[in-house]
């Protein structure tokens, strides 16, 4: 493995597609019954599915549990400052 991995300690455990436990969580960015977005030590994590519910939230310990039917858990690129800068630079060419 390469030495450029900047990911801190983080883990994901999915049980029977019904319960997802995540460690290394810094922030709960947003959530609804179809999508949960978490900021973790390894980047932004998108959890999608149906009837999702945040059953445990302990940011001081970095732990989150999500119940419901989990279809996908994937790390995504952060949106925000980079996109805004791109939009402004396109407008002022």
Image (cartoon, rainbow, N blue to C red):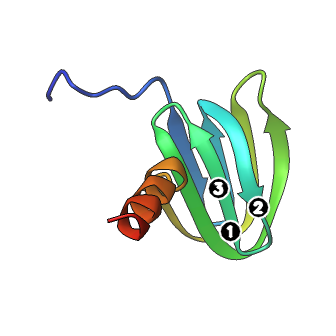
> Label 2, label 3: how many angstroms apart (C-alpha)?
6 Å
Distance from Cα at disc 1 to Cα at disc 3 = 7 Å
- Residue 4 placed where, x, y %? 21, 25
**Residue 37, labelled with which disc?**
3
Residue 61 appearing in the image: yes
Q: Quadrant of residue 30?
A: bottom right
Percent across and percent down for residue 20 are 64, 53
Q: Is there a contact, CB below 8 Å, between mark 2 and mark 3? A: yes
Identify the disc placed on residue 63: none
Q: CA distance from mark 1 to mark 2?
A: 6 Å
The residue wearing badge 1 is 35
Taking the image as shown, residue 16 lies to the left or right of residue 59, namely: left
Q: Which residue is mark 2?
A: 31
Mark 2 surroundings within 10 Å by alpha-carbon count, few (fewer than 14), some (14 through 19), many (20 or more): some
- Name the element at disc 1: strand
Q: From the viewer's perspective, is residue 41 above or below residue 78?
A: above
Q: What residue sits 64% from the left and 56% below the top?
A: 37
Report the front residue among 45 and 61: 45
Image marks 1 and 3: residues in contact by CB distance under 8 Å: yes
């Amino acid at each position: 493995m390469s030495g450029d991995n900047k990911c801190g300690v983080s883990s994901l455990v999915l049980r029977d597609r019904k319960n997802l436990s995540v460690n290394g969580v810094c922030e709960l960015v947003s959530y609804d019954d179809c999508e949960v977005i978490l900021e973790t030590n390894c980047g932004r994590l998108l959890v999608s599915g149906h009837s999702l519910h945040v059953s445990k939230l302990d940011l001081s310990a970095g732990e989150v549990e999500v119940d419901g039917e989990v279809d996908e858990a994937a790390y995504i690129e952060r949106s925000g400052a980079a996109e805004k800068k791109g939009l402004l630079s396109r407008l002022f060419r």
